[in-house]
């Protein structure tokens, strides 16, 4: 009888998901997160495979294709717009507002994956790299929280502003930042620069950071020769989405076990 009980317990431990069934996860981001759909049911997005591995109580995406971390001087609060391309209001800030306004229990984990469009369309986000992380910390938290979205026009300040807004609304949530993976649409140098800024901000904000540009199997040089993990050099194929989803799940397992 004892051996059967031990076997059942051992099997339960092996099959137990990373996050217990009572956990809730929200994800924000750009197109590679959006590909999984709001309910994370599409295999083209990493969120699907992540959900299959984690099996949380709930997993919902607020991501939008074309989104950037960086706001513009014309950005305002707009929780309804869904244009699927670059736009003044297609920013992480408005995804944060949608999450905060959603009539659902507060998430236990919030994962944000963005930065590709900040690097790819840096000409349309001229302030994205105009401010260092050090400069973005020139004001105290309360001053940053009270800033208008239109005043937050650098990548570093946008990361800080949005994470502070999330921490204010969801103080118990673990926040995880994903850097953009490599793409054939933007130089590896710009992608790495965006990743460095996000990682440095994450350390200051006590957020776990996953460097997809360094750890993902999506390598721009390889995808230029033959597209395997992407469909077009930027957006994941099913194979790429599965690889990223498992990578993110493994990283969180190591962090929270």
Image (cartoon, rainbow, N blue to C red):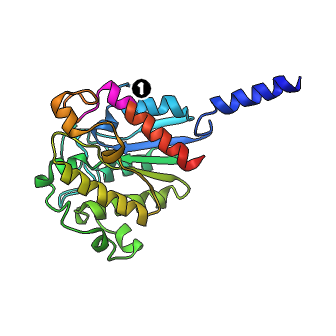
Residue toward you, 5 or 64: 5
Q: Does the image show residue 104?
A: no
Q: Position of residue 249 (x, y in %)?
A: 48, 39
Magenta segment, which residues?
235-242
Disc 1 residue crowd, few under 14, some 14–19, many 20+, Cα 10 Å: some
Residue at 42% x, 35% y: name it. Answer: 245
Quarter holding residue 215:
top left
Q: Position of residue 62 (x, y in %)?
A: 37, 41
Residue at 88% x, 27% y: name it. Answer: 2
Q: Is residue 36 above or below residue 154?
A: above
Q: Is residue 128 left or right of residue 211?
A: left
Can you say which quadrant of the picture contains the N terminus?
Answer: top right
Quarter holding residue 157:
bottom left
Secondary structure at badge 1 equals loop
Q: Is residue 201 left or right of residue 170?
A: left
Residue at 18% x, 61% y: name it. Answer: 73
Q: Position of residue 18 (x, y in %)?
A: 58, 38
Specify whether residue 237 is painted magenta. yes
Residue toward you, 171 or 212: 212
- Most extreme residue toward the right is 1
Q: Is residue 153 above or below residue 100?
A: below
Specify whether residue 256 is painted magenta. no
Residue toward you, 65 or 49: 49
Q: Which residue is mark 1?
A: 41
């Amino acid at each position: 009888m004892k051996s059967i009980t031990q076997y059942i317990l051992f099997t339960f431990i092996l099959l137990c998901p990373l996050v217990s069934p009572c956990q809730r996860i929200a994800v924000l981001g750009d197109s590679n997160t959006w590909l999984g759909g709001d309910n994370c049911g599409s295999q083209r997005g990493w969120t699907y495979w992540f959900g299959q591995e984690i099996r949380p109580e709930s997993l919902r995406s607020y991501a939008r294709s074309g989104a950037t971390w960086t706001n513009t001087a014309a950005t305002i609060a707009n929780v309804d717009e869904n244009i699927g391309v670059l736009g003044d209001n297609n920013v992480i800030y408005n995804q944060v507002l949608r999450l905060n306004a959603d009539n659902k229990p507060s998430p236990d984990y919030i994962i944000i994956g963005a930065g590709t469009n900040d690097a790819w369309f840096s000409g349309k986000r001229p302030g994205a790299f105009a401010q260092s992380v050090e400069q973005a910390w020139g004001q105290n938290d309360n001053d940053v929280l009270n800033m208008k979205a239109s005043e937050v026009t650098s990548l570093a300040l946008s990361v800080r502003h949005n994470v502070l807004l999330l921490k204010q609304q969801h103080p118990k949530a673990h926040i995880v930042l994903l850097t953009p993976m490599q793409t054939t649409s933007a130089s590896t140098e710009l992608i790495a620069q965006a990743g460095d800024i996000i990682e440095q901000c994450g350390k200051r904000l006590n957020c776990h950071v996953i460097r997809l540009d360094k750890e993902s199997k999506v390598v721009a040089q390889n995808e230029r020769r033959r597209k395997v993990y992407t469909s077009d050099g930027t957006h994941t194929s099913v194979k790429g989405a599965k690889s990223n989803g498992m990578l993110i799940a493994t990283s969180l397992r190591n962090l929270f076990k």
